[in-house]
Each structure stands twice: as C-alpha cells, then as structure tokens.
Image: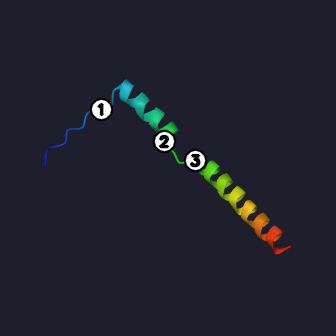
C-alpha cells in the first residue's frame, strides 16, 4: 500500500465538493411519485376488472 498524504483543499476543490454534494443525491420525491402512480393504476385496473 502507498502512503497517503493529505493536503488542505484548494478553493477549486472545495467548490467541486459543494457542487457534487448538491447534485449527487437520489431523487426520492420522483421515486415516491412513480410508485404512487403505479399503485393507483394497479388498484384502478383491479377494481375495474372486478366489474
């Protein structure tokens, strides 16, 4: 293994990290809405299929 040398972050590195923290996240709201629409469509199809 190589030795790891840590140095203080430059301003450019700090800006990159802030951008990645802001952008790199899971779209939980979109995932939740897609699941809700799928559930409602499935429920509607089952209820219409019964009659």
Q: Secondary structure at mark 3?
A: loop
Number of marks present in the image shown: 3
**Residue at image location 53% in from the left, 48% down from the top:** 26
Q: Please report contact status of discs 1 and 2: CB closer than 8 Å, yes or no.
A: no
Q: Secondary structure at mark 1?
A: loop
Residue nearer the viewer, 50 or 17: 50
Query: Left or right: where does residue 46 sit relative to residue 34?
Result: right
Query: Left or right: where does residue 33 sit relative to residue 45?
Result: left
Q: Gap in Å between the C-alphas at discs 3 and 2? A: 9 Å
Q: Bin the neighbour count of mark 1 within 10 Å (Cα to Cα): few under 14, some 14-19, many 20 and up.
A: few
Residue nearer the viewer, 20 or 40: 40
Q: Gap in Å between the C-alphas at discs 1 and 3? A: 32 Å
Residue annotated with mark 3 = 27
Based on the displayed image, in which of its 4 quarters is residue 12 positioned? top left
Residue nearer the viewer, 36 or 12: 36
Q: Which quadrant does the C terminus fall into?
A: bottom right
On screen, 15 above or below 48? above
> Residue 49 bears which disc, if any?
none
Residue annotated with mark 1 = 8
**Residue at image location 34% in from the left, 26% down from the top:** 10
Residue annotated with mark 2 = 24
């Amino acid at each position: 293994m190589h030795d790891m040398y840590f140095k203080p972050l430059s301003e450019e590195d700090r800006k990159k990290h802030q951008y990645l923290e802001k952008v790199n996240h899971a779209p939980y709201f979109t995932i939740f809405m897609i699941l809700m629409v799928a559930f409602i469509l499935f429920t509607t199809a089952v209820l219409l299929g019964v009659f």
